[in-house]
Each structure stands twice: as structure tokens, then as C-alpha cells.
């Protein structure tokens, strides 16, 4: 069972991922607020300043939150859930910034180190890689 603290931590990571390229896109803003409302944390005092963009999130903060969220010995399932959550946000605006791709790549590298034989995770990562490659091709 997911507790309220881990839900808030995940929302903070998503907000950080939205800020990782230096600004929040309108689609990302809408996605974040919808998820925060659905999870019942939109009005939490430790979420509101970030959710309503009263405070920007620096990339280093986002990475710190990811490390804290995953802990010392995350499972492949932990990585999978985090990658899925971040991917939903990142692709909500139909645009993948370089910084966002780096975040996904870092998570992929960490999860590959953890257990590279996880078939579900590998399938998700391949989809993300394919989407990223298509995005890079469109940019060039």
C-alpha cells in the first residue's frame, strides 16, 4: 500500500521533472494538477508552492528527490513505476526536452545496473528510447 508521504514524494519528483528544462509547459501544468488532485495532495502545504509554481525546482533538487524516493536498494518495480510516472508527464506536452531525456536515461542506466533481465521494464525502456529517437530525428 502506498502511503501519503510516498505519493507526495512522487508528485514532487514529477514537478521537478516538469521544471528540469527550466519551465513548465501548459500541458505539464495541467497534467501535474490533475494527478495531484486525483492523489489528494494538491492542497498539501509542502506540495502547493511547487505545484502552483510559487517556487521553481532546480535539476539538482529533482535528482535528490529521485534518489531519496528510490532509497538504498530499489527494486526493478520501483524503477518501472517511477519511469512510467515521469514518462506520462514528459510526453503530456508532446515534446521531450534534452534535460527530460537525460533524467529518463539516468533512471534507465540505474535500473539496468539493478537488473537488466526484467522483461517488463526493458519493454518500457525500449518504448521510451524509440519515442526519444523519433523526437531527436524530428529536431534534426
Image: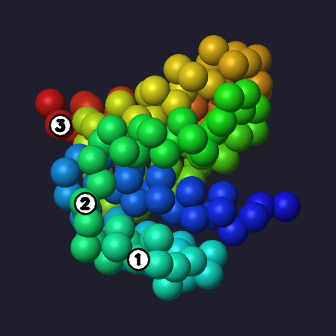
Along the line of sight, which residue is nearer the eye, 140 or 17? 17
Label pair 3/2, CB-CB below 8 angstroms: no
Work out whether residue 68 can be spotted. yes
Q: Is residue 17 left or right of residue 124?
A: left
x, y percent for residue 42? 50, 80
The residue under the point 27% across, 71% down is: 53
At mark 2, the secondary structure is loop
Position of residue 124 relative to residue 32, above or below, is: above
Q: Which residue is mark 3?
A: 139
**Label 2 or label 1, whichever comes before in sequence order:** 1
x, y percent for residue 22? 19, 51
Position of residue 114 relative to residue 35, above or below, is: above
Q: Which residue is mark 1?
A: 48
- Crowding near the residue tagged with mark 2, few <14, some 14–19, many ≥20 C-alpha atoms within 10 Å: some
Q: Which residue is mark 2?
A: 56
Tell me the CA gap for discs 3 and 2.
27 Å
Work out whether residue 91 can be spotted. no
Amino acid at each position: 500500500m502506498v502511503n501519503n508521504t510516498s505519493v507526495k514524494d512522487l508528485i514532487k519528483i514529477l514537478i521537478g521533472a516538469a521544471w528540469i528544462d527550466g519551465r513548465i509547459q501548459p500541458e505539464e501544468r495541467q497534467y501535474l494538477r490533475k494527478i495531484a488532485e486525483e492523489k489528494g495532495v494538491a492542497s498539501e502545504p509542502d506540495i502547493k508552492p511547487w505545484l502552483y509554481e510559487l517556487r521553481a525546482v532546480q535539476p539538482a533538487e529533482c535528482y535528490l528527490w529521485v534518489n531519496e524516493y528510490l532509497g538504498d536498494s530499489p527494486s526493478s518495480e520501483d524503477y518501472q513505476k517511477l519511469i512510467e510516472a515521469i514518462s506520462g508527464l514528459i510526453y503530456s506536452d508532446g515534446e521531450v526536452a534534452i534535460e527530460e531525456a537525460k533524467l529518463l536515461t539516468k533512471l534507465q542506466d540505474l535500473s539496468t545496473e539493478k537488473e537488466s533481465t526484467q522483461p517488463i521494464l526493458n519493454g518500457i525502456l525500449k518504448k521510451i528510447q524509440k519515442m526519444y529517437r523519433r523526437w531527436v530525428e524530428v529536431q534534426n
